[in-house]
Image (spheres, helix red, strand yellow):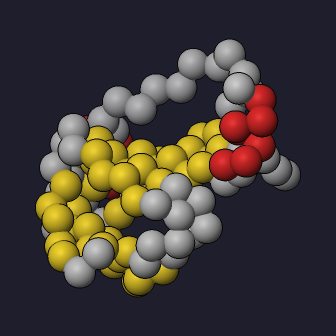
């Protein structure tokens, strides 16, 4: 069974999970040809090894605390912090605490510009 992603006009909550964080899993909230939005759930001590995606990204910390490594430095993201990276830039994450993040990936930069 395919997962249901939000459709145009749907309202999605990205509020902190709070007590539900420990039992929650990462999920894709929106997926289209040009855009992907995910809620990442990382347990304390877990890592996402260095990787890269072709599109531009933003990562916003909703709850917890994350070490975000990119461009030769480590930045700590706490609730409310957001970081932007250009497409193709290598990056890695380390969860200092149980955390949830909002990851936005721009998949089709040219497609978006053509529609504006």
**Quarter of the image where one finds residue 91:** bottom left
Q: Quarter of the image containing the C terminus? A: top right
Residue located 77% across and 36% down the image? 114
Q: Position of residue 98 (x, y in %)?
A: 24, 59
Q: Is residue 6 visible?
A: yes
* Location of residue 46 in the rendering, given as x and y in whole percent from the top left corner: 31, 76
Decide if residue 38 is in sight here: no
User: Along the line of sight, which residue is nearer the eye, 8 or 1?
Assistant: 8
Residue plotted at (82% across, 50% down)? 2
- Compared across the picture, whether 57 is left or right of 99 comes to right
Q: Is residue 12 above or below residue 68?
A: above
The correct choice, above or below, for 30 with respect to 25 in the image is above
Indicate left or right for 104 with 81 as reference.
Answer: right
Q: Position of residue 34 (x, y in %)?
A: 72, 45
| Along the viewing direction, whichever of 28 and 84 lies nearer the viewer | 84
Tag count in the figure?
A: 0
Tell me: residue 99, above or below residue 96.
Answer: above
State the residue in front, 72 or 12: 72
Name the residue at 59% across, 59% down. Answer: 55
> Looking at the image, which residue is at 18% across and 76% down?
73
Q: Position of residue 27 (x, y in %)?
A: 56, 51
């Amino acid at each position: 069974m395919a997962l249901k992603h939000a459709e145009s006009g749907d309202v999605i909550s990205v509020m902190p999970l709070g007590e539900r964080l420990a039992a929650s899993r990462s999920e894709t909230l929106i997926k289209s040809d040009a855009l992907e939005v995910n809620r990442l759930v990382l347990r304390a001590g877990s890592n996402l090894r260095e990787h890269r995606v072709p599109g531009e990204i933003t990562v916003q910390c909703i709850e917890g605390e994350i070490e975000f490594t990119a461009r030769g430095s480590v930045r700590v993201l706490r609730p409310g912090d957001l970081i932007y990276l250009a497409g193709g830039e290598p990056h890695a994450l380390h969860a200092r605490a149980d955390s949830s993040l909002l990851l936005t990936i721009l998949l089709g930069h040219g497609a978006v510009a053509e529609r504006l």
